[in-house]
Amino acid sequence: MELDKKVLHLIENDARLSAKTMAVMLDEDEEKIAAIIDKLESEKYILGYNTIINWERMGNDGVTALIDVKVTPEREVGFSRVAERICRFPEVRCVYLMSGTYDLSVTVTGETMQDVARFVSHKLSTLDQVQSTTTHFVLKRYKQDNFVFEEPQEDKRLVVSP
Amino acid sequence: MSSMSSYISGVVQELPPSGIRKFFDLVTQTEGVISLGVGEPDFVTPWHVREACFYSLEKGYTMYTSNLGLPELREEIAAYEKRKIGVSYSPADEILVTVGVSEAVDLALRALIEPGDEVLVPEPSYVSYAPGTKLVYGKPVPLLTYDADEYRLRPDILEKAITPRSKVLILPFPNNPTGGIMKAEDLQALVDIIIKNDLIVLSDEIYAELTYEGEHVSIASFPGMRDRTIVFNGFSKAFAMTGWRIGYACGHPDIINAMNKIHQYTIMCAPIMAQMAAIEALRHGEGEMRKMVDNYNYRRKLMLNGFTQIGLSCFEPRGAFYCFPSIKNSGMNSEDFCEKLLKEEKVAVVPGNAFGNCGEGYIRCCYAASVGNIEEAIERMGHFLARHRKG
């Protein structure tokens, strides 16, 4: 379990580390590390591997919106059934249950603002349990999953020092 | 421009220029270099520490502090050293906050050494002990440490080097550049010799937190050693605060007081913003520091394994963040090796002889570098060795 955690910490910030490299870093067999990764993947401790891309720089002008959703919880299942339903839409990137003035925070991406607006008015608001929505469009991303977007990642150290 | 060199004092004229300086110029002229030549962490100072410094400036902390350093900082240092090495120091008169450990070592040498006194300096070691000794007209006496002894200081080598003029022993462990450490039993073997010969020990423990096998042990924690040892530590390595220039010395009040006399006339006090940041580092920084240490340890194994794969024989470093492999089977001396490696493969490492003559035949490689750079550098070094290997 301790080793599983160490592996997860290592690949959390660099998913491209090979089992071979991690094996050396952790003083373990390559096969053992590979088996741990397989297990973590098949048991869904590792859900997948993403790439964080600065799409704006590629000239892509897709839009992202964070939508606050108030819903009516249902007997026995609470918020889960409606949350799971919202998760199924492919344009939905994240769904969180929140404390505070609204219940679900839903992150949606689309090609244009109209796409997102259409999703909200046609798909989301029309669900029986949804009472209201408030849509916030993202204007600029500064930091995501530990990566700062515009900051050059240069090594500021002297190249040789005692 | 006419030469002014005849005005320079004899002792300074005779100081050799740092071997690292020359190499530094060469590296900066080359493009696309992967540098394993650095002597500092690749982490930026943790944000909460930097933020504490801003906050102190906003609140207007821009003035001198007590010569010894801010009382709160000395209290934190006392608590930290008690936790770490199990020795108690009074914040009132046994701790001096300095501009890095470099200043503290200089103060100690100036406070202790009379012209002609001998200072025992293990080699290879950090570059400043011998010049610091010469500047106060002392005589540095090298104590060689060896690959085969895992770069520990052997008691017989210490004993043999002692003369009636021997006054100070420097113990720079964990060691830069070798990564050697002194375990409790290694230190125990020196204690009787030190006491019998009435030596003062300057224990430079700047890399103490970066110990990968067991816990760091300080010689100050042995019976009879506390009062004849000055413990040096700082924030540069463990807390990734090299540029803040902040360190400290702990020891007997008479010695700390003597060091403070020089400090008050030359430096006055360490910068207050660095002291404020250091307080934050000691109060809330140990968690982050532990993570950095784990990270160095991973990369230590990666570099060591890589060197073995390409046939570079290397003692397993147990502290600091350097590997110190032998390059003897290349048939080149350290400086030639480093220059050629830089020119042909664009990898910068530091020639071992920069850390004393007995470092000849070795190179220092710092693993405070990204995993990608370490792997790439090892691959390039492998190509280089394959071309140049003798016999």
Image: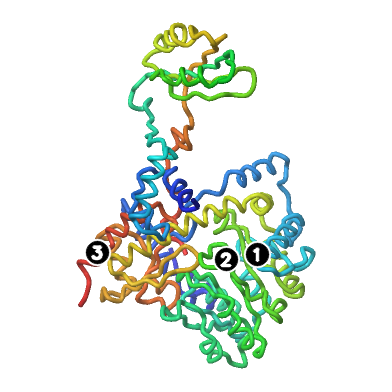
What amino acid is labelled 1 in the image?
Answer: Lys
Tag of residue B84: 1
Q: The C terminus of chain B is located in which quarter?
A: bottom left
Q: CB under 8 Å between callouts 1 and 2?
A: yes
Along the polypeptide, which appears first: circle 2 or circle 3? 2
Q: Dividing the picture into quarters, in which one does residue B207 lie?
A: bottom right
Could you tell which of marks 1 and 3 lies nearer the N-terminus? 1
- Type of the residue with mark 2: Ala
Residue A123 image point, x, y percent: 44, 9
Could you tell me residue B174's position as x and y percent? 53, 69
Residue shown at the point (53%, 71%) measured from the top left: B128
Marks 1/2 same chain: yes
**Which element carries disc 3, helix, strand or loop?**
helix
Q: Which residue is mark 2?
A: B208
Mark drawn on residue B384: 3
**What is the chain letter for disc 2?**
B
